[in-house]
Amino acid sequence: MKNLKKPKKMILTAGPSITSLEVKYVSDAVKTGWNRQYRDYTNKFEKAFGEYVGVKYALATSGGTGALWLSLAAAGVGPGDEVILPEITYFACSDVIVHRGATPVFVDILPDTWCIDPDDMARKITKKTKAIMPVYLYGNLPEMDEIMRIAKKHALFVVEDACPAVGSYYKGKHAGSFGDCGAFSFQGAKIMVTGFGGMFVTNNKKLFERVSYLNAHAEDPHRKFWQTGVGYTFELPNVTAALGLAQLERIDELVKKKRQIFDWYNAHLSKIDGISINTERKKTKSNKWMTSFILNKKFKFTRDKLIAELKKYNIDSRPFFYPISSFPMYKNAHSPIAYHTGLNGINLPSGYECTKKEIDYICAVIKYLLS
Ligand SMILES: *Cc1c(COP(=O)(O)O)cnc(C)c1O
């Protein structure tokens, strides 16, 4: 290990790529995006994003969480309803369900995709189930054919949490275009960024109109300042949308780099016995937003110890999302794969600026610590 040169600064887990294109669009939006042009970039961004995903309607939001919030509100999810979601996801997913007065029902994940297990999902459906929320964890692909088949059979509303999945495809169709609607995030650590920001997408005109109405404070569209319901506002500012538009124009380049980073890691880590890293099933293409691995046997270090050790080498890493039912507000659901994965998984530095040299270094340290 002595011959490995520790970098001067911590190698971070995430980080975007900002070029002169982003600076150009944002500067233009600051100068021109007022009065009659107050929503020009937001309109352009929504149109381009909808076309990219392959859906008819897109509404820019303040974040992925806002898009999920609007989805459940528009679907009429409320007290007495159950919403099914995977145990391993970002806690915003359960928050939006609880805020509707509904009950989150946690389901196990598959050991390879880390996404919702369709069989366990089917088992957890009751008379109270109103909606299901498959999650594209770290850009991975849920089994959408199977999920949609089960949802149709039980007439359930499907909101796809595709927040981390810009650039991910299941059987040639983009994430977020399978269910009744989908949500995306452009938070600063995601594959394309606007700082904070998100997008609601759907092919359903009525649903889009309902979401747009709710997001405009439920104001009567024909009578200024007259409210006909209780609304919200999760708007994405025009200046921020300018940044999003530039990032979207560069999405192929951003996905390519993420997949390259994964390949660099994979060349080293696939040789370590007892760990598993991101896998792609046939006919799926992940954006490989975060290269991650799971410790599947006892090593010298536990997951949390390993994270602390890596820090000493100036390597930042993150624990997997914890199983949501382990938080004090919920009843423990004990989904076995979710608990194993959530408590033994690590996200590795996967920011756009990561170099091959850095990844060779990170892998050498991991190999050393796990040997
Ligand atoms: C990032 C993320 C979110 C939240 O998105 P925000 O834009 O931060 O609100 C929700 N779900 C998943 C799975 C995510 O990765």
Image (cartoon, helix red, strand yellow):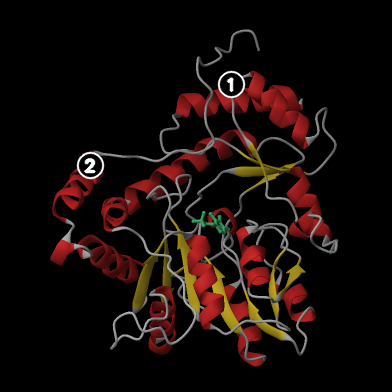
Which residue corresponds to the image point at 50% horizontal and 25% vertical from the top-left? 358
Q: Quadrant of the N terminus?
A: top right
Residue 23 numbered mark, or none? 2
109 with respect to 284 (left or right)? right
User: Which element carries disc 2, helix, strand or loop?
Assistant: helix
Q: Residue 366 in the image: x percent, y percent? A: 67, 27
In primary-sequence order, the first of circles 2 and 1 is 2
Q: Amino acid at mark 1?
A: Asn
Q: Residues within 10 Å of mark 2 (few under 14, many from 20)?
A: some
257 with respect to 113 (left or right)? left
Q: Quadrant of ligand 1?
A: bottom right
Q: Residue furthest front?
A: 225
Closer-to-camera residue (141/306): 306
Closer-to-camera residue (236/302): 236
Residue 350, visible in the rendered structure: yes
Question: Viewer-nearest of labels 2 and 1?
Answer: 2
The alpha-carbon separation of the residues under discs 2 and 1 comes to: 30 Å
Q: Residue 145 in the image: x percent, y percent? A: 58, 78
Q: Is residue 58 above or below residue 19?
A: below
Q: Amino acid at mark 2?
A: Val
Which residue corresponds to the image point at 33% horizontal and 52% vertical from the top-left? 252
Residue 314 numbered mark, or none? 1
